[in-house]
């Protein structure tokens, strides 16, 4: 499958490399098609890796991974072109984070979420919230003392969620579907919980699991 990753940060690069490793062609998109971070990533990621602008990645892709900083997310989608994303699955890995006194918090919550906002920005796409509840080192093939962790996902389209579940399984995740995209109101605070536990304990080798 052809996959476009919007964003050149650690999460986007990690997912891009992981997707290549399981057989996909990946274009890493950024505001500047000649972004040096993207070029360096592609040079080390092999023949299935390419780079381009946000618009290039959106046109190239059958599936999109959204991995931008929240402050730049709407602009990135505008540059990508909403028409280019219509009908496609968009994996939303973002969290609507703001920082006050060094402590992260959410710009949206309780009655709204970043995932829902992304879906409103992309009414023709199938947005699935995923990969937002753990740090980048554990996103692909997580290895933890307590065994395989669970990834919670939310989205309105069942086929899109099935596609994301297949990707997660390839990465070694067990998936728990909590329903529609409004479930992102619950998943985005899990990012804060993950960060606060890490900050208090000084360790970042943790993830979530539902015991049942």
Image (spheres, rainbow, N blue to C red):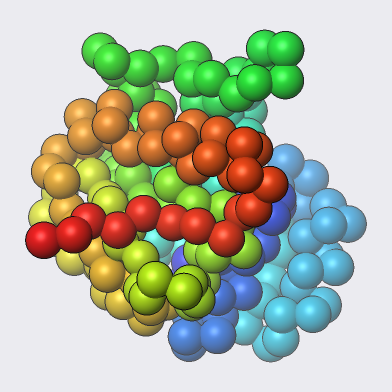
Query: Would residue 26 be visible to someone looking at this image?
Result: no
Q: Residue at x 39, y 71 (%)?
A: 146
Examine the rendered structure and indicate whether residue 189 appears above or below residue 58. above
Report which quarter residue 125 is drawn in.
Answer: top left
For this rendering, which residue is in front, 45 or 51? 45
The location of residue 174, given as percent across then percent down, is 27, 69
Judging depth in this view, the residue of 147 and 114 nearest the camera is: 147
In the image, 79 versus 211, the foreground residue is 211
Tell me where residue 97 appears, x and y as whole percent: 56, 25
Q: Quadrant of the C terminus?
A: bottom left
Left or right position of 118 against 78: left
Image location (x, y in percent) of residue 34: 84, 55
The residue drawn where x is 28% and y is 15% is: 110
Residue beneath the point at 39% across and 37% down:
190
Residue 157: % across, % down: 15, 49
Quarter of the figure with residue 199: top right
Q: Can residue 17 be seen here?
A: yes
Q: Is residue 146 above or below residue 116?
A: below
Q: Is 196 placed left or right of 172 in the picture?
A: right
Q: Quadrant of the N terminus?
A: bottom left
């Amino acid at each position: 499958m052809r996959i476009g990753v919007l964003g050149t940060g650690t999460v986007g690069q990690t997912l891009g490399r992981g997707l290549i490793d399981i057989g996909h062609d990946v274009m890493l998109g950024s505001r500047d098609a000649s972004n040096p971070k993207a070029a360096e990533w592609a040079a080390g990621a092999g023949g299935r890796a390419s780079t381009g602008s946000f618009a290039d990645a959106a046109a190239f892709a059958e599936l999109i991974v959204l991995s931008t900083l929240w402050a730049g997310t709407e602009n990135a989608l505008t540059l990508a072109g909403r028409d280019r994303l219509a009908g496609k699955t968009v994996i939303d890995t973002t969290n609507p984070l703001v920082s006050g006194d060094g402590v992260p918090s959410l710009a949206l919550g309780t009655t709204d979420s970043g995932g829902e906002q992304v879906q409103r920005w992309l009414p023709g796409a199938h947005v699935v919230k995923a990969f937002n509840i753990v740090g980048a080192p554990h996103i692909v093939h997580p290895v933890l003392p307590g065994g395989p962790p669970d990834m919670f996902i939310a989205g309105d389209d069942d086929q899109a969620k099935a596609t994301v579940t297949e990707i997660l399984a390839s990465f070694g995740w067990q998936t728990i579907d909590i329903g529609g995209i409004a479930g992102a109101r619950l998943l985005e605070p899990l990012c804060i919980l993950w960060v606060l536990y890490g900050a208090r304990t000084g360790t970042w080798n943790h993830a979530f699991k539902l015991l049942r």
